[in-house]
Image (tube, rainbow, N blue to C red):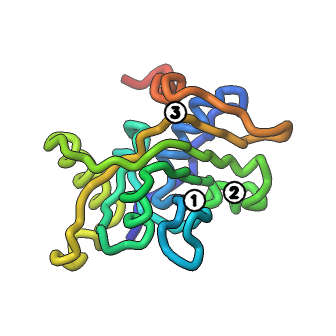
Amino acid sequence: MQRNRCSGLHIPPHDAVARVARFVANQVTWASMATISSHDPVRGQPFSNAFSVSDGPLGRGSGVPYFYLTRMEVSVQDLKVNPQASLSMSLAQTDYCAQQGFDPQSPLCAHVILSGSVLQVNDTAEAEFAKKWLFWRHPEMVDWPSDHDWFFAKFNISQVWVLDYFGGVKTVTPEEYFQATPFRKHPHSG
């Protein structure tokens, strides 16, 4: 069972661009990562692949997308040659857009594209954080073959692109993204 949600949560207003980006990154359980292929016959061309992600606990994520990767995976081999990538996430991956009647391509069905690079997590505390929340959102990962050289990685964000309303894409800096709080506490809660 993959743990994601959106039901009953309120997406931040579209003019709070960094908050929207953090909200989307926290709600999705997978993302489409585009790498530059290092494999024939598409060498040098964009290559997109789906990856399970988690940025931490629902409602309190770090904003950093984490992955559980194997060097056997074709996109991971691309990243060894060139770690630059883009990561696309959409509320179409939750129940939000369907419940609102929004087509996945509609700007009202918020989506975020992160540009940056994929880095192996070497810090023990950060690796434990990644493991805890990836395995919580994706419980079957714990049973994946142990002989596949699995490791934890993170997306090192250099640019954030957000499409959450009509009028074109908006950008926020990584600093704005990480400073944003995707969820507001109720004024009467602790």
- Report if the CB atoms under discs 1 and 2 are less than 8 Å apart: yes
Badge 1 crowding class, 10 Å Cα cut-off, few under 14, some 14 to 19, many 20 or more, is: some
Amino acid type, mark 2: Cys
Q: What residue is shown at x 85% (from left), y 37% (from top)?
A: 167
Amino acid type, mark 3: Pro
Question: Is residue 135 rendered to the left or right of residue 173?
Answer: left
Q: Which residue is mark 1?
A: 94
Q: Secondary structure at mark 1?
A: loop
Q: CA distance from mark 1 to mark 2?
A: 7 Å
Q: Quadrant of residue 129?
A: top left
Q: Which residue is mark 3?
A: 182
Badge 3 crowding class, 10 Å Cα cut-off, few under 14, some 14 to 19, many 20 or more, is: many
- Measured from the top left, where is residue 56 in percent x and y? 35, 45
Amino acid type, mark 1: Thr
- Report if the CB atoms under discs 1 and 3 are less than 8 Å apart: no
Query: Earlier along the polypeptide chain: callout 3 or callout 2?
Result: 2
Q: Which residue is mark 2?
A: 97
What mark, if any, has residue 103 been given in the picture? none
Please state which of residues 30 and 75 is positioned toward the viewer in this rendering: 75
Image quarter in which the N terminus is found: bottom left
Q: What residue is shown at x 56% (from left), y 26% (from top)?
A: 173
Q: Secondary structure at mark 2?
A: helix
- Measured from the top left, where is residue 178 in percent x and y? 46, 28
